[in-house]
Image (cartoon, helix red, strand yellow):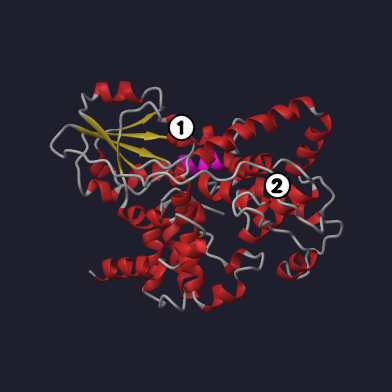
Amino acid sequence: MFEPSYTAALERLNAFVPHAGRDYASKRNYDDLAYVSALSPYIRHRLITEEDVLKATLSRHSASAAEKFFQEVYWRTYWKGWLELRPGVWAQYRSDLQAALNRIQTESGLRQDWEAACKGETGIACFDHWARQLTETGYLHNHARMWFASIWIFTLRLPWTLGADFFLRHLLDGDPASNTLSWRWVGGLQTIGKTYLARPDNIAKYTEGRFNPTGLASFAAPLEGTPPPARGPVPVSGSFDPNRRTGLLVTEEDLSPGWLLDQLRPVATATLQTTQTRSPLAVSPNVTEFVRGGLHDCSARFAQRLGPVTEVTAQTLAAWASAHDLDQIVTSYVPTGPTRDALQDANLVQVLRPYDAAAWPHATHGFFRFKEKIPGLLGQIKGLSAV
């Protein structure tokens, strides 16, 4: 379904843009990929960027005509910014996940229920369908993700962290911020006291009668958990000297380094894949191969500007830098998540994209306050696209 290349992303974008206005607004909640962009695997790894998507859509629609689609793009940006201001939430998730994984080693009933949910063998037809669809294709419609998470938490009564991990192991667009915070939101941990309940009538309507489940939970009591911490400082972009011997590090977090290459000429480039660190368990080959293909596509697209390219690990990065006698390693800012965890001891100059620098400082409260800033953010992008 998803070829890991810029060309495939651009083709999908161009096919969707004519439908980003009224069609998307009226049909986006139906569990049918024909009604959505399905660009998220590409945007998550920045094979194609949010700016690419927004500029292309603005070339065809006004900000008001495609308002719903723009909001969905900015939801991902908002989640990223929110977590950057509160990285402790990611650390707490990882700790709680390990505790839940320890439980399934000692509680046979929990392990059986968890395995049945992951295999799509719960007896709840819609849920089982989505579980199999996810493991087979690496993708789920956003509405199906919400229903799935709600059933996992409130009907099956499984730890939410195990569900978030299941998604992160299998989603091609699995993102530490969007995934973790969306599961927290469904369970009532993100917006304190507010939960999301999967209702049979809603599922029947938006699957157009394919599913009409019975026996789902009729009440969703908020989960108990630690309240979100106070927000911290806004990330600051690093600065580099373009006259020094510079190596470029390309991670799976940003596979469009052209904006950095406009500012520097690396003597060598390293590519780093950290997909396997998304979970303590095995990550789906679908995800691993998609990311590997994206890294190779990036290397091929920018081959004339990268210098010699070497695949490295977090452990061999320093040796690579030494072998090329580098004075500095420059990379796109690495957001909170497993890639940053893997690189925590690396000496890097992390440069923040202007898009993120403009949006993330507004992720201070809920999305609806952030949403007020979207017209101004779009105005900046529209201005750039007109230059």
Q: Is residue 92 magenta?
A: no
The stretch of residues the image draws in magenta is: 287-292
Answer above or below: position of 88 versus 262: above
Secondary structure found at label 1: helix
Look at mark 2 in the image and give the residue it sits on.
223
Write the residue at 71% across / 51% down.
222
From where the camera sits, is residue 223 visible?
yes
Q: Would you identify the image quadrant in which residue 311 lies?
A: top left
Q: Which mark is residue 341?
A: 1
- Amino acid type indicated by mark 1: Asp
Q: CA distance from mark 1 to mark 2?
A: 27 Å
The quadrant of the picture occupied by the C terminus is bottom left
- Amino acid type indicated by mark 2: Leu
Q: Position of residue 362 (x, y in %)?
A: 40, 57
Q: Would you identify the image quadrant in which residue 208 lies?
A: bottom right
Question: In front: 109, or 44?
Answer: 109
Q: Nearer the viewer, mark 1 or mark 2?
A: 2
Q: Would you identify the image quadrant in which residue 342 lies?
A: top left
Question: In front: 218, or 247?
Answer: 218
Crowd tier of the residue under label 1, counting other residues whose Cα lies within 10 Å: few below 14, some 14–19, many 20 or above: some
Answer above or below: position of 172 versus 266: below
Of the two numbered discs 1 and 2 on the same chain, state the one appearing first in sequence. Answer: 2
Write the residue at 82% across / 64% down.
212
Write the residue at 67% across / 30% down.
99
Q: Position of residue 269 (x, y in %)?
A: 29, 35
Q: Position of residue 160 (x, y in %)?
A: 68, 43
